[in-house]
Amino acid sequence: MRKLAAGNWKMNGNAAALSEVTALLSAHPDPTCEMLLCPPATLIAQMNWAARNSALRIGGQDCHAKAAGAHTGDISAAMLKDAGATYVILGHSERRADHGESDEEVRTKAEAALDAGLIAIVCVGETELQRDAGQTLAVVGAQLKASVPDAVTAENVVIAYEPVWAIGTGRTPTLDEIAEVHAFLRAELAARIGDQATGVRLLYGGSVKPSNAAEIFALANVDGALVGGASLKAADFGAIVAALSA
Ligand code: PEP
């Protein structure tokens, strides 16, 4: 399985920020791991052009469940693909919180992504209250079950475990806690799709940075990272790519 370093720029970056892509590619032209950046939709086509003939893949941060229609302000999976995306992040906790996205909506969006030929990165993760209440596995298990399409394979879906309380906070779970959730996700997938589950990439996300990447990547069942803040700067994201390629 090829590991995946995925960066989520969220609502950050303009055309000038594409210099980070140039810097990243000149420092890491051919990493062992797969390298993905998901910029705001306004930059997808330009970033795709900046990354032409390179190892960098481009992704969206959300898509609509329908292929086209009267949905002002929304973007379909086919449009992302047309702009150069090969991946799309779905069900990020910021979208679940800001836009009230349910597991059911995330699943229909993921189905649309698969129909359009995109790889869906489906995010799951517990809040701090849920962790403190001992509900982490129940919460991520329910999200996994309801958000991931039945057509899931090792090729078309990536799962990102992102504890909500670790996103953008500088706090991370312990290594044992990350390993426990990833082992659980692998077992849940195996119960659903059998041997295929061993090939589904399970990313950890939540305050991954150059200083903690190597120890997280050394854990069993961690097949890469979904990185927010540290993906905005080529030096930081490049260091994470290097740790995953080691
Ligand atoms: C994210 O946006 O998915 C994320 C994990 O953010 P950060 O790395 O900044 O915590």
Image (cartoon, rainbow, N blue to C red):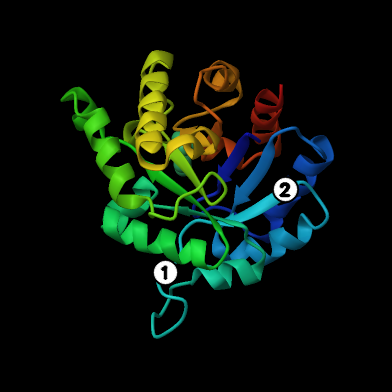
Residue 106: x percent and y percent? 35, 57
Q: Residues within 10 Å of mark 1 (few under 14, many from 20)?
A: many
Which quadrant of the structure image shows residue 166?
top left
Residue 143: x percent and y percent? 29, 44
Which quadrant of the structure image shows residue 212?
top right
Which circle marks residue 56 in the picture? 2
Above or below — where is 34 with respect to 181? below
**Residue 142, visible in the rendered structure:** yes
Name, please, the residue furthest toward the bottom. 70
Q: Nearer the viewer, residue 83 or 97?
A: 83
Tell me the element at label 1: loop
- Taking the image as shown, residue 148 lies to the left or right of residue 24, namely left
- Taking the image as shown, residue 146 lies to the left or right of residue 1, namely left
User: Which residue sits at x=47%, y=76%?
Assistant: 67
Tell me the element at label 2: strand
Residue 66: x percent and y percent? 41, 74
Find disc 1 in the rendering and name its residue. 64
Residue 205: x percent and y percent? 46, 34
User: Which residue sits at x=44%, y=26%?
Assistant: 170
User: Which residue sits at x=84%, y=40%?
Assistant: 26
Q: Residues within 10 Å of mark 2 (few under 14, many from 20)?
A: many
The N terminus sits in image quarter: top right
Dot 2 or dot 1, earlier in sequence: 2
**Residue 171, visible in the rendered structure:** no
The C terminus sits in image quarter: top right
Residue behind label 2 places its C-beta within 8 angstroms of ligand 1: no
Amino acid type shown at disc 2: Leu
